[in-house]
Amino acid sequence: MSLLARLQSKSTEVATTAEPAVRQEPVRQVTAAPEETVIPAVPKPVRPAVPVRKKAPEPTDEYVELKNLTLKHILKERKNGDVDDIVTELDEIIADILKENDHIKATENLDKLKEELTNDLTGYGPINPLLLDENVSEVMVNGPNMVYAERGGKLELTDVTFRDNEHVMAVLEKIVAPLGRRIDESSPMVDARLKDGSRVNAIIPPLALGGPTITIRKFSKDPFTIHDLVRFGTLTEEMAEFIRACVEAKLNIFVSGGTGSGKTTTLNVLSSFISNEDRIVTIEDAAELQLGQEHVVSLETRPPNIEGKGAISIRDLVRNSLRMRPDRIVIGEVRSGEALDMLQAMNTGHDGSLATGHSNSPRDMVARLETMVLMAGMDLPIRAIREQIAGALHVIIQQSRLKDGSRRITNITEVQGLEGDVIVLQDIFVFRQSGLDENGKIIGKLVPTGIRPQFYERMEYEGIHLPASIFVEKE
């Protein structure tokens, strides 16, 4: 036997015969701690409650088969028929299918079946009742099994579901096809609007991991008026008179705020104060403004085609609008280099222009405008940009969506000019919160700061009189 083999066999024998060593811990004397030093147990963190949805009962196999057979019959036999006639004859169609298929028993949920078929034929499938509900302001489809709706500024999980991803895609195709748009793997995102003005955004796999995602922001059939905003608590009557005077005096106004804060609604209300004699040009990504004046020209951007060509941006439309002899230019949202063209238009005689943009405060809006001007590709010094902003803008209206879901105007700020390298802003009205009511709603209102704006004399020259008491807080 070799030396290595003998050493290995010897080590194996030692390992099997030796008893395991017992480790003796040193004995420590334990003394009782005084009561004052006892540390209380730390409570476990409470996890936020997960929204619970009332799960609808699963449809039976016979129910699903009857529905599929009905849809196939309609697509095959009544493909070119009038939809309204098909809906009125659903009872007869279902009865004929039940006669032809003896193994299917007459289901008890015939009313539900007819409702679902009607939604598929005339509307947008399972979400059609949500779109018809006047209390719902937004519908969000996060895949086939999770549909949210916004009511009163609060999101809630609904019991609406789709069969599968293909069902969601069929509804999405029904939304975008009449608009001349397409959505597939080569073009997985789409922005569009429905006939009633509702804005639609959709994104599908592979970009959306949870399945096709649809977001529909509804708009009221009858546009809100300034009285509606006062009734909602968005602003007070005094503030309503003030912003009306600002529009009539042809001041350049910028509405800023976060996503879903109500900027477009406020812009629509501001636009309603424009004189019927003015020529108005509106520029939007998706036409949402509902102006009641007679002389309105509405322009809308165009996305690129399949080859990635032919896109028309907001900046292109702003440049073109300057050749259309506008008295007022209304821009739905400024988010890029079009800010430079907008500021130049405001500084070259197009007073009374209106626009919106995303920001958290009036000061933040000014900083974002500087950034957006730089996105135009012009190598301008910061001071030159700030001079353009200070000379163009007169009023910034800041709108916010508060914790209770309400949408309020939180600041009405005057752009007073440039001192050194700093744009001077002065709040004319600010939102002051005074507490919460028993339902958790925020109590507060816009109050004046006591400072009269510099353009007050300009309003007087224009024949627009505002009482000086409007700038003094009432007790």
Image: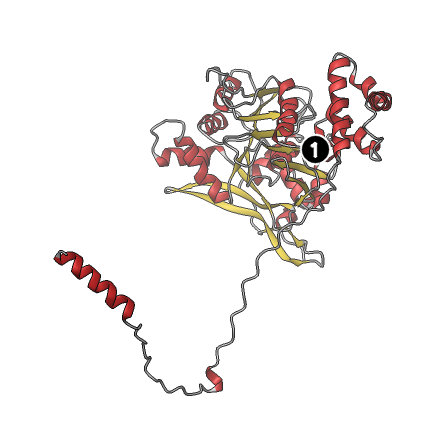
Look at 51% across and 70% down and name the residue there. 42
Residue 464 in view: no
Left or right of 232, for residue 283: left
| Residue 104 image point, x, y percent | 81, 28
Color encoding of the figure: secondary structure
| Residue 3 image point, x, y percent | 12, 58
Vertical order, 392 against 179 (above or below): below
Quadrant where the C terminus sits is bottom right
Q: Nearer the viewer, residue 401 or 434?
A: 401
The number of numbered badges drawn on the structure is 1
Q: Nearer the viewer, residue 265 or 286?
A: 286
Amino acid type for the residue under numbered disc 1: Ile
Left or right of 430, for residue 114: right
Q: Nearer the viewer, residue 372 or 63?
A: 63
Look at 59% across and 34% down and name the residue there. 461
Quarter of the image where one finds residue 326: top right
Residue found at the very far top of the displayed protein? 80
Residue 307 in view: yes
| Residue 166 image point, x, y percent | 62, 27
| Residue 35 image point, x, y percent | 49, 86
Vertical order, 427 against 263 (above or below): below
Quarter of the image where one finds residue 148: top right
Q: Secondary structure at mark 1?
A: helix
Quadrant where the N terminus sits is bottom left
Look at 27% across and 71% down and name the residue there. 18
Mark 1: few/some/many CA within 10 Å (<14, 14-19, 20+): many
Residue found at the very far left of the displayed protein? 3
Residue for badge 1: 127
